[in-house]
Image (cartoon, rainbow, N blue to C red):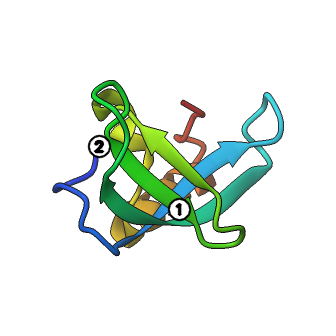
Amino acid sequence: MPLRSKPKIGGLYFLITFTDDNYARPMIRSCEYKGKGGDQEFPHLFRFLDSDDEFVFSDDKLELALDLDELIEALKDLRDGKLKAS
C-alpha cells in the first residue's frame, strides 16, 4: 500500500509489523518523517516517537510508512483477513 503523496517533514507515520507468521499479532509503531537525511541508497530519515531512535528507508520501501488514513485502511484489511506482512 504506497503512500498517496510524498511524506511531509514533521508528519506522523505508522509502521505495521507482525510478531508471528500467521499475521495475527500486529505491532504498530509511530514515527515522524525528518526529511532527506540518509545517503543516496537510503535517503528518507524517520524517528520513532517512543524511543527517539532514527532509521532510514529507501525509495522503494517508503510505502511501508503509512499515514493515518492508510493505517486505518490497513487495519480494516487486517480485520477482513486481507493484510499480509511485507
User: Which badge, 1 or 2, comes first in the chain's sequence?
Assistant: 2
> Which residue corresponds to the image point at 73% horizontal and 42% vertical from the top-left?
18
Relative to 21, 48 lies left or right: left
Q: At which x and y percent is residue 65? A: 42, 51
* Residue projecting furthest to the left: 5
Q: Secondary structure at mark 2?
A: loop
The three-letter code of the residue at mark 2 reads Pro
Indicate which label's residue lies in the foreground, 1 or 2. 1
Which picture quadrant has residue 11?
A: bottom left
> Which residue corresponds to the image point at 55% horizontal and 53% vertical from the top-left?
15
Q: Which residue is mark 2?
A: 2
> Which residue corresponds to the image point at 70% horizontal and 72% vertical from the top-left?
50
Relative to 13, 23 lies left or right: right
Q: Which residue is mark 1?
A: 47
Q: At which x and y percent is residue 52? A: 64, 67
Number of the label disc, if any, that sits on residue 65: none
Structural crowding at the residue carrying mark 1, measured as other residues with C-alpha within 10 Å and reported as few (<14), some (14–19) or many (≥20): some
Structural crowding at the residue carrying mark 2, measured as other residues with C-alpha within 10 Å and reported as few (<14), some (14–19) or many (≥20): some
The residues tagged by marks 1 and 2 sit, at their Cα atoms, a distance apart of 19 Å
